[in-house]
Image: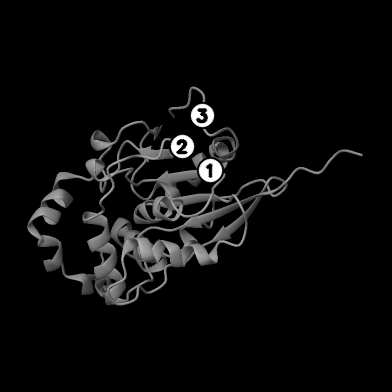
């Protein structure tokens, strides 16, 4: 009788203000992987990113998990991995250190301009869907409403602050970075050592899910991709 393979527990962390439904079309072979979805919790008053990461680790119920984070969720899983052992650490459409942040975010960090951002703007999503015209805008508005559901102002302020002020100098050598060459939030020109998804944008985990269904299992198991850039 063949020995049963051990199942890997994969935890997905969505991007800023997003809910786990961004991963709804990503499917991993059930005989090899058990998928779990993490959700944003509201930060405590004055809570640091380190403290938040340790609190989020309380939702990890398995040893040596695979952590996968998108965008700001990618920053968070990197912080979480500092305090637990992980089998694999993967970020998507994110950054590995503050050096990879775009110039606009570095400027916002240096000047404190991030404090002036209208964080109530996410509530505009509801209104945008009503006034959007044209097929493209209506689809985009529906997309925003469906996936961006965390509207708490304390959380938004905290998330923006901890993105632009992320104080990471050294990259985890075991980290795997998947990034689209058309990412409009974190431009690929600033990103080093990553698996490139041709034509991939910042929301490619949603609209390029077939790429992930094809390649993510191999990336998790092997920790790399051979001759992959398509």
**Secondary structure under the numbered disc 2 in the rendered image:** loop
Name the quadrant containing residue 229.
top left
Nearer mark to the viewer, of 3 and 2: 2
Label 2 vs label 1: CA separation?
Answer: 8 Å
Front-most of 89 and 93? 89
Q: Label for residue 88?
A: 1
Q: Label for residue 174?
A: 2
Q: Is residue 64 left or right of residue 68?
A: right
**Secondary structure under the numbered disc 3 in the rendered image:** loop
Q: Which residue is mark 3?
A: 225
Label 3 CA crowd tier, 10 Å (few <14, some 14–19, many 20+)? some
User: Which residue of the protein is positioned furthest toward the front in this rendering?
Assistant: 83
Label 2 CA crowd tier, 10 Å (few <14, some 14–19, many 20+)? few
Label 3 vs label 2: CA separation?
Answer: 14 Å
Could you tell which of marks 3 and 2 lies nearer the N-terminus?
2
**Residue 210 visible in the current orientation:** yes
Residue located at (46% from left, 55% from top): 83
Residue 160 in the image: x percent, y percent? 24, 62
Residue located at (92% from left, 39% from top): 1
Label 3 vs label 1: CA separation?
Answer: 14 Å
Image position of 68 with respect to 198: above or below: below
Q: Quadrant of the C terminus?
A: top left
Could you tell which of marks 3 and 1 lies nearer the N-terminus?
1
Image position of 99 with respect to 148: above or below: above
């Amino acid at each position: 009788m063949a020995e049963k393979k051990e199942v890997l527990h994969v935890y997905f962390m969505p991007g800023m203000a997003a809910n786990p439904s961004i991963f709804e079309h990503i499917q991993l072979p059930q005989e090899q992987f058990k998928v779990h979805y993490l959700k944003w919790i509201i930060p405590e008053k004055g809570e640091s990113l380190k403290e938040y990461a340790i609190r989020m680790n309380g939702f990890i119920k398995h040893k040596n998990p695979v952590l996968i984070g998108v965008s700001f969720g990618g920053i968070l899983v990197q912080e979480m991995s500092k305090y637990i052992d992980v089998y694999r650490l993967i970020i998507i459409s994110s950054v590995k250190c503050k050096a990879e942040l775009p110039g606009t975010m570095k400027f916002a960090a240096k000047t404190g301009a991030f404090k002036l951002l209208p964080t109530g703007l996410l509530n505009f999503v509801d209104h945008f869907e009503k006034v959007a015209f044209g097929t493209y805008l209506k689809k985009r508005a529906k997309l925003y409403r469906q996936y961006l559901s965390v509207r708490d102002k304390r959380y938004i302020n905290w998330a923006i602050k901890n993105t632009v002020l992320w104080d990471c100098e050294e990259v985890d050598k075991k980290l795997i970075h998947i990034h689209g060459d058309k990412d409009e939030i974190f431009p690929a020109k600033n990103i080093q050592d990553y698996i490139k998804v041709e034509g991939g944008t910042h929301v490619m985990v949603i609209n390029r899910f077939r790429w992930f269904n094809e390649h993510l299992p191999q990336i998790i198991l092997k920790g790399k991709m051979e001759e992959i850039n398509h």
